[in-house]
Image (cartoon, helix red, strand yellow):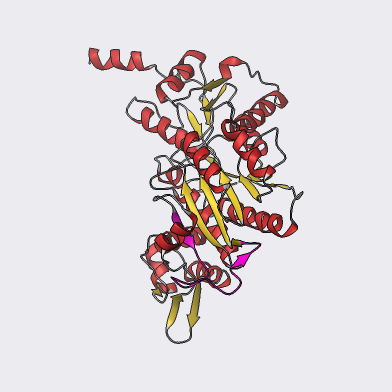
C-alpha cells in the first residue's frame, strides 16, 4: 500500500519536513529565522493547512523550531558554527574534517570537558567524500543531535570511498584523546586488523550498516535481509517470475544480506534462483545489467541500492525501454535520487536518521559501561511503492539489447 496520497511513497507532511530539513542543512534557514507559516507551506506544497500544521508540530516536538504567539514560528536548534580549525588542531584532524556539532562556544571548552584524560569528543568516519547525499546527512543529524544533548562534540572525517584513507584515519585516532569512534566503513574486512587494534585498546567503537564478521563489534544496521525479502516478494506478487539481483560488492555484509533475502523470497515462492539471476559488477555498469536482462529474459531488476538503480534507469531512458511497462526496476535505501527519477523509484526505506541516533546512543552506552560492552541493533525497513515497478509484461517481447537498438537506429 502506498504511503500518503500523492503517489510518491512519502507522506505529504513528511515531504514538507524533509524540505525544511534541507533548508536548515544548507543554511537557508538559520537560528532565529522565521519559518514559513502554515498558510505559506500549504500554498507552496499544495497541501491542506492541517497537513502543513502537522509538519510544523513535529518540528516543535523535535525542538528544532519554536512558536511565538502572534509572530509565527522560528528556527531554534540548528547546530551553530564553531572554531573548527582550533578543535581539529587539538585532535590533529585532517584538513577535510568537519566539526558538525559542539556543545560549547568557539574558543572554549565547558567545565568538565576532560574525562579520563580525554576531551569529550566523538569521531565519525564516513565512507564517502565530496557532497554527501541526504541519506548520509540524516545519519549525521541523528548522531549529532544525540551526542550534543549529552555534552559531546562530533568530528566527521571523510574517507573518500578509499579503504586506505579509512585505515590511516583509524590508526591516527588510536593515539588521539577521543571519547569514542563511530564508523560507516568503506570496507570493514579490508581494515579488520585496524578495527581489532581499536578494540584491543578498549576504545569505545560502534559500526554503522556493516562490520567485521569475525570481531565482536557494536553495530547498528537495518534489517537488510528482511527488506530485500519483502521487495522480492512484492515483485513476485506483480507477476514477475524472472527477476535479476544487481549488486556491486559481494564481499560487503550489507549486499550479502540483501542477496540472501532475495534468494529466500524466490525460493519460498517456488521460483528458481541460479547464477543467471544474480549479477555483481564492481563498476556497477548498467550496460552489463541490461545485457543480462536481455539474454535471460528478465522482467524485473532489483538493484542493491538506489544509486545503482538510478544509473540503470538513466541508461535505459534513451534506449526505448519503457519503465515499468517493459521492465520493472527497484532499489534499496529511499535516498533523494530515487524520488527525483522519472519514473520515481520503488525502493526499500532505511530509517537513516534513527540509525544515526541509535548508533550515538549505543556509543554513549559503550563509553559509560566500559570494556566488555557489546550490542547489535537492527532497525526495521519499509517498502516504498512508486512508479518504477508494475505488473509483469505478458505479451511484450524481451527488453532489446544495446546492439539491436543500435542496429535499428542505423537502419532508420
> If the image is split into quadrants, where does the C terminus sit?
top left
Above/below status of 118 relative to 193:
below
**Closest to the observer: 202 or 74?**
202
- Quadrant for residue 283, please give it: top left
**Closest to the observer: 169 or 284?**
169
Residue 227: where, in percent of width, then height? Answer: 63, 39
Q: Which residues are magenta?
A: 98-117
The answer to whether residue 55 of the structure is visible from this angle is: yes
- Quadrant for residue 274, please give it: top right
**Left or right, residue 340 beside residue 225:** left
Residue 277: where, in percent of width, then height? Answer: 57, 19
Residue 270: where, in percent of width, then height? Answer: 70, 22
**Closest to the observer: 301 or 184?**
184
The answer to whether residue 385 of the structure is visible from this angle is: no
**Residue at figure coordinates x 34%, y 25% from the top left:** 319
Please tell me whether residue 102 belongs to the stretch shown in magenta.
yes
**Residue at figure coordinates x 58%, y 64% from the top left:** 152
**Left or right, residue 232 beside residue 400:** right
**Closest to the observer: 340 or 389?**
340
Above/below status of 248 relative to 29:
above
Please tell me whether residue 331 belongs to the stretch shown in magenta.
no
**Residue at figure coordinates x 57%, y 49% from the top left:** 175
Residue 255: where, in percent of width, then height? Answer: 59, 32
Amino acid at each position: 500500500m502506498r504511503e500518503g496520497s500523492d503517489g510518491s511513497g512519502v507522506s505529504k507532511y513528511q515531504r514538507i519536513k524533509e524540505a525544511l530539513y534541507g533548508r536548515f542543512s544548507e543554511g537557508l534557514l538559520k537560528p532565529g529565522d522565521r519559518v514559513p507559516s502554515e498558510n505559506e507551506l500549504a500554498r507552496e506544497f499544495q497541501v491542506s493547512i492541517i497537513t502543513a500544521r502537522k509538519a510544523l508540530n513535529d518540528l516543535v516536538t523535535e525542538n528544532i523550531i519554536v512558536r511565538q504567539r502572534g509572530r509565527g514560528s522560528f528556527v531554534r536548534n540548528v547546530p551553530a558554527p564553531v572554531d573548527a580549525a582550533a578543535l581539529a588542531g587539538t585532535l590533529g584532524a585532517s584538513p577535510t574534517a568537519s566539526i558538525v556539532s559542539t556543545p560549547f562556544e568557539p574558543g572554549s571548552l565547558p567545565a568538565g570537558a576532560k574525562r579520563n584524560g580525554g576531551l569529550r569528543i566523538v569521531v565519525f568516519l564516513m565512507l564517502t567524500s565530496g557532497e554527501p547525499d541526504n541519506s548520509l546527512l540524516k545519519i549525521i543529524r541523528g548522531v549529532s543531535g544525540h551526542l550534543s544533548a549529552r555534552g559531546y562534540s562530533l568530528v566527521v572525517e571523510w574517507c573518500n570511498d578509499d579503504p586506505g584513507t579509512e585505515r590511516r584515519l583509524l590508526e591516527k585516532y588510536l593515539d588521539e584523546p577521543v571519547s569514542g569512534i563511530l564508523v560507516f566503513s568503506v570496507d570493514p574486512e579490508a581494515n579488520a586488523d585496524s578495527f581489532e587494534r581499536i578494540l584491543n585498546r578498549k576504545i569505545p567503537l560502534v559500526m554503522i550498516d556493516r562490520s567485521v564478521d569475525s570481531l565482536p563489534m557494536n553495530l547498528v544496521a537495518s534489517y537488510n535481509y528482511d527488506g530485500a525479502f519483502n521487495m522480492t516478494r512484492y515483485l513476485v506478487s506483480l507477476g514477475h517470475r524472472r527477476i535479476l539481483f544487481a549488486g556491486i560488492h559481494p564481499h560487503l555484509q550489507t549486499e550479502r544480506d540483501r542477496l540472501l533475502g532475495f534468494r529466500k523470497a524466490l525460493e519460498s515462492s517456488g521460483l528458481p534462483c541460479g547464477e543467471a539471476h544474480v549479477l555483481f559488477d564492481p563498476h556497477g555498469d548498467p550496460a552489463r545489467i541490461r545485457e543480462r536482462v536481455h539474454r535471460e529474459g528478465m522482467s524485473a531488476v532489483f538493484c542493491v541500492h538506489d544509486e545503482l538503480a538510478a544509473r540503470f534507469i538513466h541508461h535505459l531512458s534513451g534506449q526505448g525501454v519503457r519503465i515499468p511497462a517493459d521492465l520493472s526496476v527497484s532499489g534499496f535505501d529511499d535516498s533523494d535520487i530515487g524520488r527525483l527519477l522519472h519514473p520515481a523509484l520503488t525502493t526499500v526505506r532505511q530509517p537513516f536518521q534513527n540509525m544515526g541516533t541509535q548508533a550515538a546512543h549505543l556509543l554513549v552506552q559503550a563509553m559509560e559501561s566500559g570494556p566488555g560492552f557489546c550490542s547489535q541493533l537492527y532497525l526495521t525497513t519499509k517498502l516504498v511503492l512508486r512508479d518504477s515497478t508494475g505488473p509483469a509484461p505478458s505479451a511484450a517481447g524481451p527488453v532489446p539489447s544495446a546492439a539491436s537498438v543500435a542496429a535499428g537506429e542505423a537502419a532508420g
